[in-house]
């Protein structure tokens, strides 16, 4: 996981609940972020300036600002779900690249005998290149 590719879903949701599209910016989903901001501004312009003022102040009639609350809620849910899906895809691609630690389930460096993340000894994986080389050096054959 290079350069913090794992994103925090709750942080993305919190950011998106403050400003629709901000959580998507955190996730580096530029088109989604601008789309949510555009939807929010579009709904705000259709609702009228009074609804936007009430939404920002948190006062007044709830029903006139309800469409803005709905857009913000949907943007928040979208940011949370996108972050979770992105993290799963990142872990899946990471585990395809090499060995995975049985303890912490993170990718382990194949050149090390231990997990660099949790220091669990990995030992030799049956059929691994290191085990075959060690067996050949001893002059034995694998059974």
Image: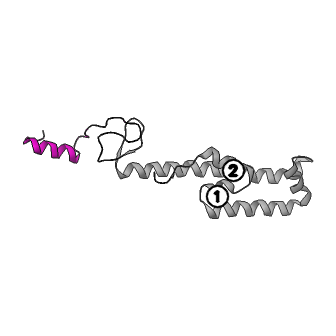
Specify the principal SS of the magenta part: loop
Mark number, residue 15 = 2
Up/down of 49 relative to 74, above or below: below
Mark number, residue 101 = none
Q: Is residue 135 left or right of residue 127?
A: left
- Looking at the rendering, the stretch of residues picked out in magenta corresponds to 118-143
Residue 128 in the magenta stretch? The answer is: yes
Q: Is residue 17 left or right of residue 28?
A: right
Q: Residue at x 15, y 43 (%)?
A: 134
Neighbourhood count class around disc 2 (C-alpha, 10 Å): few under 14, some 14–19, many 20 upward: many
* Residue toward you, 121 or 65: 121
Residue 124 in the magenta stretch? The answer is: yes
Residue sitting farthest toward the left: 139
* Residue toward you, 59 or 43: 59
Quadrant of res 50: bottom right
Q: Is residue 19 left or right of residue 137?
A: right
Where does the image place residue 141, in percent across and percent down from the top left?
A: 9, 42
- Reading the image, the residue beneath label 1 is 25
Quadrant of res 33: bottom right
Q: In what element is the residue under mark 1?
A: helix
Q: In what element is the residue under mark 2?
A: helix
Contact check, label 2 and label 1, Cβ < 8 Å: yes
Q: Residue at x 58, y 46 (%)?
A: 8
* Residue toward you, 76 or 67: 76
* Residue toward you, 12 or 86: 12
């Amino acid at each position: 996981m290079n350069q913090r590719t794992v994103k925090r879903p709750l942080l993305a949701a919190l950011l998106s609940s403050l400003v629709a599209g901000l959580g998507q910016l955190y996730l580096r989903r530029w088109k989604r972020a601008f789309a949510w901001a555009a939807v929010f501004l579009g709904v705000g312009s259709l609702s009228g300036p009074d609804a936007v003022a009430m939404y920002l102040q948190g006062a007044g009639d709830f029903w006139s600002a309800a469409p803005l609350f709905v857009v913000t809620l949907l943007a928040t849910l979208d940011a949370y779900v996108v972050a979770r899906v992105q993290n799963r895809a990142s872990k899946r691609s990471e585990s395809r690249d090499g060995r995975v630690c049985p303890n912490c389930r993170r990718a382990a460096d194949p050149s090390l005998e231990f997990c660099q993340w949790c220091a669990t000894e990995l030992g030799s994986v049956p059929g691994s290149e290191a085990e075959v080389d060690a067996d050949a050096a001893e002059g034995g054959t694998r059974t």
